[in-house]
């Protein structure tokens, strides 16, 4: 009432704050929102920047219709990429509707047919393991990170953010569930703290065997995108079916069950929350068992690679704060 008495229109001002004149404006506001709430926001944002903004950036956000969406994806050949782009665009408009952004009443992505998908269960075969391991040698520190994913079975996004500060008690990697911004640690994907035993092979790869860890990022400058690019190149050179960094994690999990340790052990070691399984385990109760399993899996993988003679790629750890 006071503002109205002064000749202001607070309702109109609130509407103006919710307005997004162009899709670029809308995407910028959505980016600010999702950065604080979604740990994997960068992947979706990269798709928005690469595929949506060049076409829609200057268009009125409220004027984008289903025909625009279909026209945009028509020129993209990769079926899975189309689905990812649609999901990213849909998320922006769905958020705008929830936030009552002026003019956005309909999500133009709704009703646009997605490409059929099938579950991928790619696991490196026993004969492929030596080939990939040798190929990792040629990839420098990126290859070292891929080796650590294979030997530990942890998520690629967590491995590339591995910190020396989190490696304690002679070789346990402690992964805080919550983000630690000061250390550029994003937190685990499911928000649950986790402990991973680093086998002798892994400690050798990261230059830590028999040494005291310094501070800093183990894989400074390495990103998930670099890992994916390297894997694509390796598969092409080897002439094998496409494999991703996550498939290395899946290969490790498969090895856990193949050695007879069971699915519960795999979920516990890989920090899964499948049906609440991860929640019922006392991490301290299973310390010695987990260590034994992780060593056994790493030893078996190395045995398949080169007959129990670890061929370890070592590099000097980069120091970073």
Image (cartoon, rainbow, N blue to C red):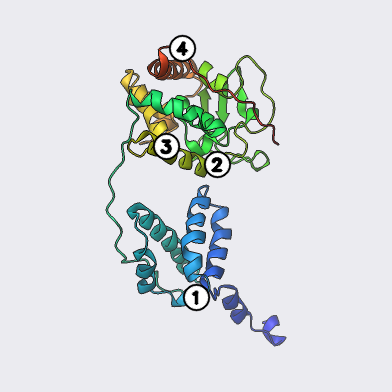
Q: Distance between the residues labelled 2 and 1?
A: 32 Å
Q: Please identify the quadrant where the N terminus is shown.
A: bottom right
Whether 320 is drawn above or below 21: the answer is above
Which residue in the structure is indicated by mark 4? Answer: 309
Query: Considering only order in the chain, which callout, 1 or 4, is on the residue closer to the N terminus?
Result: 1
Do tag 1 and tag 3 residues touch (Cβ < 8 Å)? Answer: no
Quarter of the rendering containing residue 111: bottom left
CA gap between label 1 and label 3 equals 37 Å
**Mark 3, residue position:** 246
The residue pinned by badge 2 equals: 223
- Seen from the viewer's position, the closer of residues 286 and 49 is 49
Query: Is residue 91 shown left or right of residue 255?
Result: right
Q: x, y (%) of residue 200?
A: 53, 16
Callout 1: helix, strand or loop? loop
- Mark 2–mark 4 Cα distance, whole angstroms, equals 30 Å
Q: Which of marks 2 and 4 is in front?
A: 4
Q: What secondary structure is marked by label 3? A: helix
Which of marks 4 and 3 precedes in the sequence?
3
Looking at the image, which is closer to me, 92 or 203? 203
Between the C-alphas of marks 3 and 4, the distance is 26 Å
Residue at x-position 59% and y-position 81%: 12
């Amino acid at each position: 009432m006071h503002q109205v008495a002064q000749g202001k229109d607070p309702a109109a001002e609130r509407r103006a704050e919710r307005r997004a004149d162009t899709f670029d404006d809308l995407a910028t506001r959505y980016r600010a929102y999702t950065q604080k709430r979604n740990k994997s926001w960068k992947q979706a944002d990269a798709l928005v920047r690469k595929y949506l903004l060049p076409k829609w950036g200057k268009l009125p956000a409220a004027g984008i219709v289903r025909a625009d969406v279909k026209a945009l994806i028509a020129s993209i050949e990769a079926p899975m990429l189309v689905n990812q782009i649609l999901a990213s665009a849909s998320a922006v408009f769905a958020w705008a509707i929830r936030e009552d952004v002026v003019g956005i009443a309909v999500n133009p992505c709704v009703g646009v047919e997605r490409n059929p998908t099938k579950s991928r269960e790619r696991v490196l075969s026993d004969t492929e393991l030596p080939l990939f391991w040798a190929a990792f040698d040629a990839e420098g520190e990126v290859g070292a990170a891929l080796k650590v994913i294979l030997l530990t079975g942890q998520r690629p996004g967590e491995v590339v953010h591995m910190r020396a500060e989190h490696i304690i008690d002679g070789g346990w990697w402690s992964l805080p569930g919550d983000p630690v911004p000061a250390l550029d640690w994003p937190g685990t994907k499911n928000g649950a703290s986790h402990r991973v035993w680093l086998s002798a092979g892994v400690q050798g790869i990261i230059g830590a065997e028999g040494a005291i860890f310094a501070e800093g990022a183990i894989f400074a400058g390495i990103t998930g995108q670099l890992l994916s690019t390297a894997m694509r190149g390796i598969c092409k050179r080897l002439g094998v079916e496409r494999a991703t960094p996550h498939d290395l994690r899946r290969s490790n999990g498969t090895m856990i069950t193949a050695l007879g340790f069971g699915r519960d052990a795999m979920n516990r070691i890989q920090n899964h929350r499948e049906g609440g399984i991860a929640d019922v385990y006392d991490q301290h109760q299973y310390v010695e068992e987990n260590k034994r399993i992780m060593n056994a899996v790493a030893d078996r993988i190395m045995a398949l690679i080169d007959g129990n003679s670890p061929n370890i790629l070592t590099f000097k750890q980069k120091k970073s704060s």
